[in-house]
Image (tube, coloured by chain):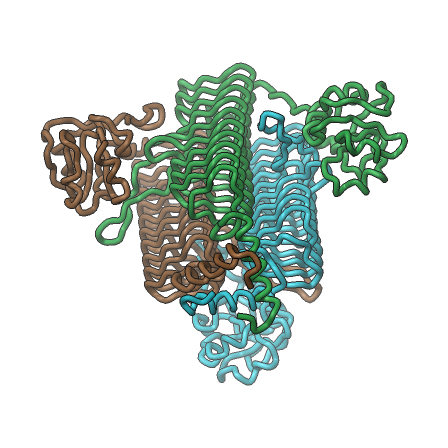
Chain colours: A green, B cyan, C brown
């Protein structure tokens, strides 16, 4: 499957030898000089395409694939149809991602500033940056070399972006220090005021000044229309490599460790502290001021009301250890299946 | 009730005969030449207004209404107060919508390009398009006749829009082929990178290139700040007539059929396949790679973890067939009402 | 802790006497002429900083604090370490917020219109407004004195903004009459078409014209990327002082009273009516056409399917009175902890 050239630059064909090297694997059963130029799932790939097998479930598709080459683990090599080459690696999905990135490298920035962009006095733009139409770079901001600032993106006063960041169209980033390679997808909101106020004697509200910042580690990615509020005092911090999907909400003073995965529409209330490698599945929520240990995993739609120890899986709303919830849910289901049960 | 003329063009008054024709119904008990110029609910409409009855619940309001004319079904005609005309149709809500659209037709595009808009070389703009301030049309994009591109909207390189599309203020649409009459409300995000990455041996992440597109059928509507990611390989597809409400999330490679209704804040994980006429109520979620049959209905806040057969209603998190969930919930409630029950 | 001067103007130091006056409290145990210039939590504040105690839980931190002055209630005064001054008030959090706002007053508007902004004919801009780059003010709009219109913000045709409103970057506001001091955070969407349509005999959809408005009371605040649809007929109304957090969805014709607190990612379906002082915690949802009484409180992730009387707490999905839900959940948990229980 060739990618649509209207939207993606054409692939640079690779020999199977090059493909294996890109995927970090060992070529088996193919002509090292044969070319691969496309990518596809096992059931759609053709002789010029690479595919991959990452899950035993898809073994039936492997047996019938017409792909030119398949990235897979040693154990599945014997199941490959005749005439299909293999790239053998213990991490086929990673290998396939690297091969795909070699075939379709991300287009480099097109250095230059669109004439309509506004760059306020005192802003410093690094070498080789691409600045799109109607982008606004605030006074005193520092944009590292090789950044791409999308159409209409707003980089606030004093913001610091490391090298190679990509700020999507319509994203806003203020009150923020970001490392290198940080990505904001379109419409992401970083650094705005958090939801903080005091109640007056007559039941009205007065805003608590939000005097902190957002600190984004290297390679952090923030999804489309997701929101990360700045700290009220002190900072909101996302550790290196952490990725937020679309429409995620992160309240003020949240601290996340490295390489967390926060799936779409998750909400994290203020001052929560997440360790490294925490995973939260879609639409889950975290109450404020909780501590979630390293590598804990929170199930989809779960509502976490208590601290979660490292390495623990929790599920449900309210969230409990996964085993307890699954047993409780099974018992509940039996009640639903037997009319009259109580 | 007249609509506020600061925001909505004044209605063109219709005779009752014209109103009945617009609503696709039969005029009963009114002077065919009398004029109707406004719209309102039964309890607020006055003698110059049209109203409607679509639900037996509102019969008490019908008895007291002062509306000039009411669109309703045959069976309720006898309940109408004296002096109120009726437009009789088996589909009163549709009839009323059509009457409303005749009184207040959507203003046509104001053809022209705001001088501040950026249209990149090679973009083709059809006849009669309205292009707002600071809009950006990328290189090679094709915009069909009669489209309205709102202020600050971004239409990416190579994007194809059919005739009569309306792209709201601040919306972004990239990597997309859209049919005719497609509507994006303000801040909608279509075509950005999905959430795809491989894990490296040291626990970091590498992005899987997202090489697909978004295909939007005719008359698809996408709500404010909703997000539709493009396919990773292959496409994300929304069938003709499908409507997404605000803040909905659609992951990469999701395929929806025709005339699906996806209510606000629903999340649909990657590679799910929905049939035609599927309804998902507010804040519901769908796990990845599921199949949801034609005309299935998913209740509000439900969390679907398994395939759903056609025509089936599911409710709950995790979602089960509606009857089972309702019985289980009733049993659970009894436990809550009797302290000490176990 | 001094706020980062790249993002926040430096504080104007206050004497303790001035600080006490700002906080509305009584100075105890400190030199009235000593200066305070920063703010911080009890465990991070230093001798030049003010802090506060609002919750018995943090008494251990009070005992060890090195803050220069602490805002607290009379009852905790005796627990203060020697050498730390106190500002005594029955409302320490409010007092601290006012002290913080005195140290860091919100910067006033920088009057003027960025040369790139578009102000359509007939728009009226009050005195002392700041209008950012690429802002668009529609024809006939009225912007009150001292408003700040952020970069790329769109104020639609005919919109009326009271004095001192702040419209964040990338926000859109159309079909709306707003009081004084209204705040829209970045990317907020106000006034777009609601989700309304009729079904045709062939299963397609036709849009019901959305002919109403949004009415925002004084001091209403709307979070980043939150959405408030205009009424279909009649209006969507948010009462004075009501605050919406990020990514909240408010459907057409919703009516909220004064001083409601709607936390992030809450969804409120069309035509719901909320009284004054209603609180909805994160990710909760409200079905359409419900009535929620004054000062009712809806727990996080709750799904409200029925009217809620004034002053009532509801929790769960579906939501019941909090006590019932907590008992039911406790019973359910016991079932999960005992394998084999039914």
Please report the residue visible at 69 percent of the width from the left and 25 percent of the height from the top. Answer: A98
Please report the residue visible at 23 percent of the width from the left and 34 percent of the height from the top. Answer: C51
In this view, the residue farthest toward the top is A127
Q: Position of residue B81 (x, y in %)?
A: 49, 83
Q: Position of residue B312 (x, y in %)?
A: 67, 63
Q: Quadrant of the C terminus of chain C?
A: bottom right
How many discs appear?
A: 0
Q: Nearer the viewer, residue C277 or A333?
A: A333
Is B19 placed above or below A220 here? below
Q: Quadrant of residue C126?
A: top left
Please report the residue visible at 34 percent of the width from the left and 65 percent of the height from the top. Answer: C310
Is B313 placed above or below A180 here? below
C26 left or right, relative to C108: left
Say if residue B286 shows up in the picture: yes
Q: Nearer the viewer, residue B276 or B138?
A: B276
Q: Quadrant of the N terminus of chain C?
A: top left
B237 left or right, relative to A287: right
Q: Position of residue B338 (x, y in %)?
A: 42, 69
Q: Nearer the viewer, residue B132 or C121?
A: B132
Please report the residue visible at 26 percent of the width from the left and 34 percent of the height from the top. Answer: C42
Q: Position of residue B177 (x, y in %)?
A: 70, 41
Say if residue A224 shows up in the picture: no
């Amino acid at each position: 499957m060739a990618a649509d050239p209207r939207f993606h630059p054409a692939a640079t064909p690779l020999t199977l030898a090059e493909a294996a090297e890109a995927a970090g694997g060992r070529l088996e059963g193919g002509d090292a000089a044969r070319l691969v130029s496309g990518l596809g799932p096992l059931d759609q790939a053709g002789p010029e395409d690479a595919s991959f097998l990452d899950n035993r479930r898809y073994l039936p598709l492997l047996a019938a694939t017409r792909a030119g080459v398949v990235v897979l683990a040693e154990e599945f090599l014997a199941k490959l149809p005749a005439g299909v080459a293999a790239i053998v690696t213990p991490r086929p999905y990673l290998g396939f991602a690297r091969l795909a990135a070699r075939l379709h490298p991300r287009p480099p920035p097109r250095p230059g500033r669109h004439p309509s962009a506004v760059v306020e006095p005192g802003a410093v733009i690094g070498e080789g940056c691409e600045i799109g139409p109607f982008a606004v770079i605030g006074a005193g901001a520092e944009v590292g070399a090789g950044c791409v600032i999308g159409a209409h993106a707003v980089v606030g006063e004093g913001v610091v972006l490391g090298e190679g960041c990509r700020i999507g169209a319509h994203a806003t980033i203020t009150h923020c220090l970001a490392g290198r390679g940080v990505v904001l997808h379109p419409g992401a909101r970083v650094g705005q005021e958090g939801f903080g106020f005091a109640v007056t004697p007559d039941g009205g509200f007065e805003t608590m000044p939000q005097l902190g910042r957002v600190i984004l580690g290297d390679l952090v990615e923030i999804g489309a229309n997701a929101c990360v509020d700045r700290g009220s005092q002190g900072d909101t911090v996302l550790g290196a490599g952490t990725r937020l999907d679309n429409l995620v909400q992160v309240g003020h003073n949240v601290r996340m460790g490295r390489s967390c995965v926060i799936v779409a529409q998750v909400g994290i209330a203020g001052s929560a502290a997440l360790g490294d490698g925490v995973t939260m599945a879609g639409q889950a929520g975290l109450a404020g001021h909780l501590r979630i240990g390293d590598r804990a995993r929170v199930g989809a739609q779960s509502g976490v009301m208590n601290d979660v120890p490292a390495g623990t899986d929790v599920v449900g709303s309210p969230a409990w250890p996964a085993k307890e919830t699954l047993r409780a849910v099974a018992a509940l289901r039996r009640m639903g299946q037997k009319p009259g049960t109580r």
